Image (cartoon, helix red, strand yellow):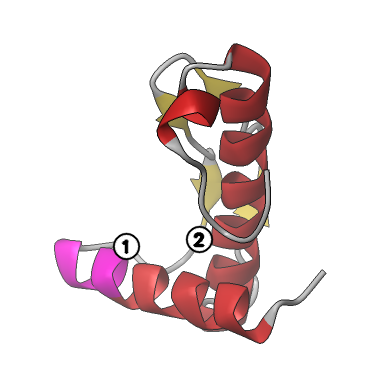
Amino acid sequence: MGGSSINSEEVNDKEVLETYRHSVSHIMAHAIKELYPGTKFAIGPAIADGFYYDIDSEHTKTEDDLKVIEKKMKEIIKAKNP
């Protein structure tokens, strides 16, 4: 698995897909921490259909926030942060 994407063969590999989802969940958490300081994270595993995080934040998230979070995630990936 190279770069920030996976190919169709890798998508069918359960272990590769789980690793990818796990990594993306960490990128999402990193983005949320930068955008909404003070946010607290609970559980956030990779699951069969993707991943999620339970979070506690004073800021109520909206559909617009999801776009902002996605943009920040892309910036983090582009910067190639470890």
Q: Pointer 2: what residue? A: 57
Does residue 66 appear to the left or right of 76 in the view shown? left
Q: Pointer 1: what residue? A: 60
Counting from the top left corner in percent of width and height, residue 33 is at 62, 71
Counting from the top left corner in percent of width and height, residue 36 is at 52, 76
Query: To which quarter of the image does residue 18 belong?
Result: top right
Q: For the residue labelled by badge 1, is the local secondary structure a helix, a strand or a loop? A: loop
Query: To which quarter of the image does residue 67 belong?
Result: bottom left
Q: For the residue labelled by badge 2, is the local secondary structure a helix, a strand or a loop? A: loop
Q: Which residues are magenta?
A: 63-67
Q: Residues within 10 Å of mark 1 (few under 14, many from 20)?
A: few
Counting from the top left corner in percent of width and height, residue 5 is at 51, 53
Total marks placed: 2
Q: Nearer the viewer, residue 19 or 1?
A: 1
Amino acid type assigned to the residue bearing label 1 in the image: Thr
Q: Quadrant of the C terminus?
A: bottom right
In the displayed structure, 18 sits above or below 67; it is above
Amino acid type assigned to the residue bearing label 2 in the image: Ser
Name, please, the residue furthest toward the right: 82
